Amino acid sequence: MTSGWIGGLAIRTGPGPPTADYLCTHCWYHQRLTGRERIEHGARDLPIAHRAVCPALHPQKGTP
Ligand SMILES: [Zn+2]
């Protein structure tokens, strides 16, 4: 199922409802969208939206 998938955005179409998986290779955050309409409108924003808040790319400071 994950053969060849080393992270990033992976879109699977059928059988059944299409799904889009996004796996961050920095912090291994995973998010899944289901449904063609959500994927068409939201999948390309997943990496962008996550990079803005990725804890690996934006280390929290001030926590001892
Ligand atoms: Zn991340």
Image: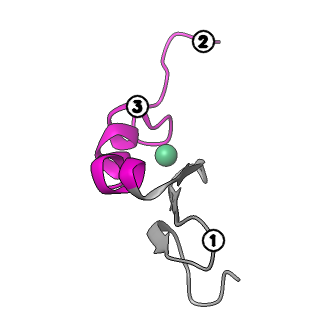
* Residue type, label 3: Val
**Mark 3 CB within 8 Å of ligand 1:** yes
Residue 62 position within the rendered picture, expressed as x and y whole percent measured from the top left: 52, 10
Image coordinates of residue 55 in percent, x first then y, are: 50, 34
Front of the two marks 1 and 3:
1
Residue that lies at the very extreme toward the right in this rendered image: 1
Residue at the spot 42% in from the left edge and 59% down from the top edge = 36
- What crowding class fits label 2: few (fewer than 14 Cα within 10 Å), some (14-19), or many (20 or more)? few
Instruction: Please say if the residues under marks 3 and 2 sit with CB atoms less than 8 Å apart.
Output: no
Name the residue rendered at 40%, 31% in the picture: 53
Could you tell me residue 24's position as x and y percent?
A: 50, 55
Q: Which quadrant is home to the C terminus? A: top right
Question: Is residue 21 placed above or below 62 in the rendered structure?
Answer: below
Q: Which residues are magenta?
A: 37-64
Residue 5 vs 19, above or below: the answer is below
- Disc 2 marks a residue whose amino acid type is Thr
* Label annotation for residue 55: none
Q: Which residue is mark 1?
A: 16
Q: Secondary structure at mark 3?
A: helix
Looking at the image, tell me whether mark 2 or mark 1 is earlier in sequence order: 1
**Mark closest to the chain's N terminus, 3 or 2:** 3
User: Residue 32: horizontal and vertical position, in percent?
Assistant: 57, 52
The residue identified by callout 2 is 63
Disc 1 marks a residue whose amino acid type is Gly
Q: Name the image quarter holding the N terminus.
A: bottom right
Q: Secondary structure at mark 2?
A: loop
